[in-house]
Image (cartoon, coloured by chain):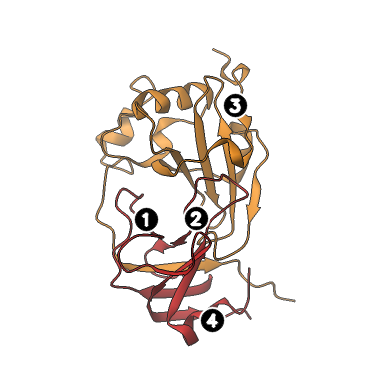
């Protein structure tokens, strides 16, 4: 994982996402996350956003896809972002 | 019944151009994933592609349908997605469980409007009101995890 990810999110106020082209071609770029608090032992970050996730997703696995309301398109077909408020971060040791 | 005689295969990314939607999530250990889904998975370590270190694959069932498989190494959750234009998701789900010897009792959530195969439903789990459930409201607070740092 990119050890600078936490700082990038903190400084930009955005979480970015892209598609998983190596799995299948039909993915639209999307920000992906798990719902819930960040466990103590896990490196990562916790955030809040007002942007509604895509409908029809698994409850614990929200995603925000290109074309949805509030999703910022940084590179059409390639990279998107949502605005977030960072609420917790655990940086790599 | 020897179920593994019906083998799914790993498909190439270009074989599915349509978006996919999650149909079930299940709690599975990595050893069980390897045993029940014996196809090569790609590692997804880019935090822009997955919320946690993950394994992913596009697979084609013996019966012909495509499934997108994503496995979170931290959460030990398997997410199974079907192409959005699948006409009968219940039928494809039945085919998936016919070819994959994963107990239906491992399912944590399934898409509203789809039905799990009856013959393998773990009634005890359902009766206890355990992990088998349908749609839940999504909280907007979320996290994205990275692999724990190595310590020397």
Do marks 3 and 1 share a chain?
A: no
As measured in the structure, the alpha-carbon distance from the residue carrying label 2 to the one carrying label 1 is 11 Å
Q: Earlier in the sequence, mark 1 or mark 4?
A: 4
In this view, the residue in front, B32 or B12, is B12
Q: Check the residue under mark 4 and report the chain it is in.
A: A
In this view, the residue in front, B133 or B83, is B83
Q: What residue does disc 1 label?
A: A60
Indicate which disc residue B75 carries. 2
As measured in the structure, the alpha-carbon distance from the residue carrying label 1 to the one carrying label 4 is 24 Å
Are circles 3 and 1 on residues that touch, CB within 8 Å?
Answer: no
In this view, the residue in front, B39 or B148, is B39
Q: Look at the numbered disc 3 and give the secondary structure of its residue.
A: loop
Do marks 4 and 3 share a chain?
A: no
Are circles 2 and 1 on residues that touch, CB within 8 Å?
Answer: yes
Indicate which disc residue A8 carries. 4
Residue under the image location 30 percent in, 69 percent down:
A51
Q: Which chain is orange?
A: B
């Amino acid at each position: 994982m990119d050890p600078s990810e936490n700082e990038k999110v903190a400084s930009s106020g955005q979480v970015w996402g892209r598609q998983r082209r190596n799995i299948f071609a039909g993915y639209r770029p999307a920000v992906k996350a798990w719902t819930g608090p960040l466990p103590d032992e896990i490196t990562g970050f916790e955030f809040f956003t007002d942007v509604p996730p895509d409908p029809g997703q698994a409850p614990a696995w929200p995603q925000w896809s290109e074309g949805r309301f509030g999703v910022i398109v940084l590179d059409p077909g390639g990279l998107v972002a949502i605005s977030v408020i960072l609420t917790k971060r655990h940086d790599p040791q | 019944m020897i179920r593994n005689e019906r083998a799914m295969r790993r498909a190439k990314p270009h074989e599915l151009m349509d978006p996919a939607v999650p149909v079930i999530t299940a709690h599975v250990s990595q050893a069980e994933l390897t045993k029940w889904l014996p196809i090569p998975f790609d590692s997804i370590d880019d935090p822009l592609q997955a919320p946690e270190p993950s394994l992913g694959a596009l697979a084609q069932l013996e019966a012909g349908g495509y499934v997108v498989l994503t496995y979170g190494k931290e959460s030990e959750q398997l997410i199974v997605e079907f192409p959005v234009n699948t006409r009968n998701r219940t039928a494809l789900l039945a085919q998936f469980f016919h070819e994959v010897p994963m107990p239906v009792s491992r399912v944590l959530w399934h898409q509203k409007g789809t039905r799990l195969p009856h013959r393998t439903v773990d009634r005890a789990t359902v009766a206890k009101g355990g992990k088998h459930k349908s749609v839940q409201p999504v909280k907007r607070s979320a996290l994205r995890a990275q692999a724990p740092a190595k310590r020397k």
